[in-house]
Image (tube, rainbow, N blue to C red):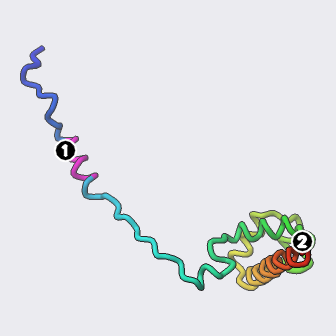
Amino acid sequence: MNTNNIDNNKPTDTQKQSDELSSEKKPTKRIRRQATEEQLSNPFHGVKLVEVLERLVAHYGWEYLGERVNIRCFINNPSMKSSLGFLRKTTWAREHVEDLYLEMLDEKEDKPKENN
């Protein structure tokens, strides 16, 4: 076997092509904007619907949620998956749940004041 003609330092044609492709498709870095005061003061800023529902269930329970927001996915065999699916599709139900979440936050803010 004659290895004198092979230069191990030279890239092959396929290596050249892959280098060219990878250099062309480099993703650009997204520039993040700073949140405004209005966004930061919004209680839903950075909070996902799943987090809202988890906090409500932990605080009130499914039974109370079913009484306050009369939807079947809270009353009959409640689950996170069915409730989230319904709330994402149904604006009026999501608004009721968001109002209940705001009430819960107000209650939590008032409790420390009462204890002092």
For disc 1, the neighbor class at 10 Å (few under 14, some 14 to 19, many from 20) is: few
Residue 70 at least partly seen = no
Q: Which mark is residue 6?
A: none
Residue 78 is inside the magenta segment: no
Counting from the top left corner in percent of width and height, residue 116 is at 89, 75
Counting from the top left corner in percent of width and height, residue 56 is at 82, 70
- Looking at the rendered structure, the secondary structure element under dot 1 is helix
Ranked by sequence position, the earlier of labels 2 and 1 is: 1
Counting from the top left corner in percent of width and height, residue 82 is at 77, 66
Which residue in the rendered view is the most extreme toward the front? 116
Magenta stretch: helix, strand or loop mostly: helix
Depth check: give the residue in front, 87 or 37. 37
For disc 2, the neighbor class at 10 Å (few under 14, some 14 to 19, many from 20) is: some
Q: Magenta segment, which residues? A: 14-22
Between the residue at mark 2 and the residue at mark 1, the CA separation in whole angstroms equals 63 Å
Q: Residue at x 88, y 64 (%)?
A: 77
Q: Which kind of residue does numbered mark 2 sit on?
A: Ile
Q: Which residue is denoted by mark 2 in the rendering?
A: 75
Residue 88 is drawn in which quadrant?
bottom right
Q: Which residue is denoted by mark 1 in the rendering?
A: 16
